[in-house]
């Protein structure tokens, strides 16, 4: 059986390595400069494996069609374990955490579900601290399924290959008594136009958008 996708593991794989002491100290210096929406942590007590840069979060969201939004847009309730982690962090760092962010599939921001949400708080300078992960792991092929939705070029390549496959399995005798490459490419051209038209109509009708445009969008139209 194919193992399900643990989104925290995927996020860790693309996050810049901060195991080296010098690199970790540089990050601490960056996040220690005060700015709006920061949380007051005791940096000596931070777990470096829980620190993630916004670029890593963005890439993971785009790859798996996830959203990274303020907690207020999240339609599910936080589990008891999340509140326990929040209390533990607040006690350890002698602070009150605020400005929570959720990284989760789009549907969790409009429907109640439990697909692998991650709870973060901002540290500053585009760094975020992981508070808690809960729920179910994602479908093992989610990244592959969402690849065409990453951007326009991916979608065009996907449509070209799908059109090629459908043209290949379509009997040319339906359109012509003579089999030739010119007939094949003519069918391929019309097949691509038909599929592309359906996809464009579907996208406009349902207000869909590409992963790169929706990963931090709060509007339901792009879900």
Image: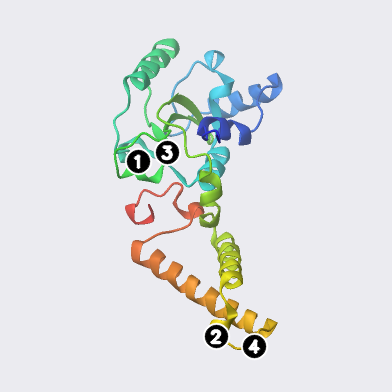
Mark toward the viewer: 1 or 4: 4
Residue 173 percent location from the top left of the image: 57, 83
User: Mark 3 near mark 1, Cβ–Cβ under 8 Å?
Assistant: yes
Residue 190 percent location from the top left of the image: 54, 80
User: Mark 1 near mark 4, Cβ–Cβ under 8 Å?
Assistant: no
Q: Residue at x 40, y 59 (%)?
A: 208
Which residue does the numbered mark 3 point to in the structure image? Answer: 104
Residue 41 percent location from the top left of the image: 47, 19
| Label 4, label 3: how far apart the Cα atoms are | 53 Å
Q: Residue at x 54, y 45 (%)?
A: 143
Q: Residues within 10 Å of mark 3 (few under 14, many from 20)?
A: many
Is 201 rendered above or below residue 112? below
Q: Which mark is residue 175?
A: 2
Q: Which mark is residue 157?
A: none
The numbered mark, 1 or 4, whose residue comes first in the sequence reads 1
Which residue does the numbered mark 1 point to in the structure image? Answer: 108
Q: Residues within 10 Å of mark 4 (few under 14, many from 20)?
A: few
| Label 3, label 1: how far apart the Cα atoms are | 7 Å
Is 35 rendered above or below residue 149? above
Q: Quadrant of residue 158?
A: bottom right
Which residue does the numbered mark 4 point to in the structure image? Answer: 178
Q: Is residue 206 left or right of residue 160?
A: left
């Amino acid at each position: 059986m194919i193992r399900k996708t643990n989104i925290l593991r995927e996020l860790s794989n693309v996050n810049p390595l901060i195991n080296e002491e010098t690199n970790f100290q540089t990050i601490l210096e960056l996040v220690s400069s005060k700015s709006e929406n920061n949380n007051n942590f005791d940096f000596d007590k931070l777990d470096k494996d829980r620190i993630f840069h916004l670029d890593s979060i963005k890439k993971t969201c785009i790859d798996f069609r996830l959203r990274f939004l303020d907690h207020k847009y999240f339609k599910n309730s936080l589990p008891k374990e999340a509140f326990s982690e929040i209390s533990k962090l607040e006690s350890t760092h002698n602070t009150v955490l605020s400005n929570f962010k959720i990284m989760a599939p789009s549907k969790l921001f409009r429907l109640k579900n439990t697909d692998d949400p991650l709870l973060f708080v901002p540290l500053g300078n585009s760094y975020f601290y992981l508070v808690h992960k809960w729920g179910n792991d994602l479908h093992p092929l989610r990244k592959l399924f969402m690849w065409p939705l990453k951007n326009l070029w991916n979608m065009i390549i996907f449509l070209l290959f799908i059109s090629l496959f459908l043209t290949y399995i379509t009997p040319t005798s339906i359109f012509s008594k003579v089999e030739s490459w010119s007939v094949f490419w003519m069918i391929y051209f019309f097949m691509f136009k038909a599929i592309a038209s359906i996809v464009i109509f579907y996208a406009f009708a349902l207000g869909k958008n590409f992963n790169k445009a929706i990963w931090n969008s709060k509007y339901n139209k792009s879900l």
